[in-house]
Amino acid sequence: MQTWDAITSRRNVRSYTGQPISPEHLDQILEAGRRAPSSRNTQPWDFVLVTDRDQLQELSKVWVGAGHLASAAAAVALILGDDPEHARRAQFDLGQATMSMMIAAADLGIGSGHAGVGDQELAGQLLGLPADKTCAFLIAFGYPADRPLAPIKRPDRRPFDEVVHRGRW
Ligand SMILES: Cc1cc2nc3c(=O)[nH]c(=O)nc-3n(C[C@H](O)[C@H](O)[C@H](O)COP(=O)(O)O)c2cc1C
């Protein structure tokens, strides 16, 4: 895919075929996250890759909106430390890493879907996190079960001219 096609094709995919993602493609997605920019280049993240079916099914229970992890081919857990200096801007940094990984996945025809984390204790236990680390977000990855990724002509978004202000508000 071309970059613009990957950007316009990405959507939140929440049902996946059973097809596994190759280790090379998973590493490419993770590499996209590692290359993301961060405030002062602090790189406040660690990524835990999960591909084990039982572990994915258990992870799907950490949040009411995380059910799609159960059928995903893989998930990446975005891990933050407890450094308050990092915490202030870390959510923004994580957002950039997330989008980089999602676009890299779309480029490969792989769907992705965010999931929040409600039960930190369960997430920490399932991911073997040290006490000073939290799982900020999860991203599920897998080949879409509904339809292949393709550029979306009319995305469910506010109108361009309502969102974009030129020069002044
Ligand atoms: C910070 C953030 C948290 C989100 N959390 C969840 C979630 O827990 N579960 C879920 O199914 N989708 C989650 N989403 C996905 C949004 O619902 C999705 O981006 C939005 O509905 C637009 O969907 P679309 O990109 O397919 O148009 C989250 C998205 C963001 C940016």
Image: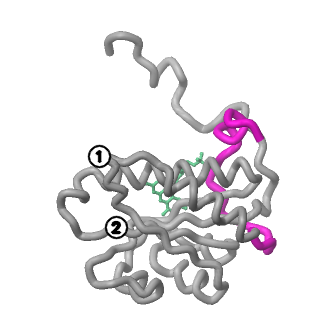
To which quarter of the image does residue 8 belong?
Answer: top right
Lateral position of residue 150 relative to residue 48, left or right: right
Identify the residue shown where x is 69% and y is 75%: 71
Lateral position of residue 38 relative to residue 53, left or right: left
Q: Residues within 10 Å of mark 1 (few under 14, many from 20)?
A: few
Q: Which residue is mark 2?
A: 80
Pointers 2 and 1 in contact (C-beta within 8 Å): no
Identify the residue shown where x is 34% and y is 60%: 44
Q: Residues within 10 Å of mark 2 (few under 14, many from 20)?
A: many
Q: Residue furthest top?
A: 167
In the picture, the quarter occupied by the C terminus is: top left
Identify the residue shown where x is 60% and y is 66%: 140
Identify the residue shown where x is 53% and y is 22%: 160
Predominant SS along the magenta part: loop
Highlighted range, magenta: 1-21
61 inside magenta stretch: no
Residue 146 % position (x, y): 79, 58
Q: Residue furthest left?
A: 84
> From the viewer's perspective, is residue 160 above or below residue 158?
above
13 inside magenta stretch: yes
In the picture, the quarter occupied by the N terminus is: top right
Q: Secondary structure at mark 2?
A: strand
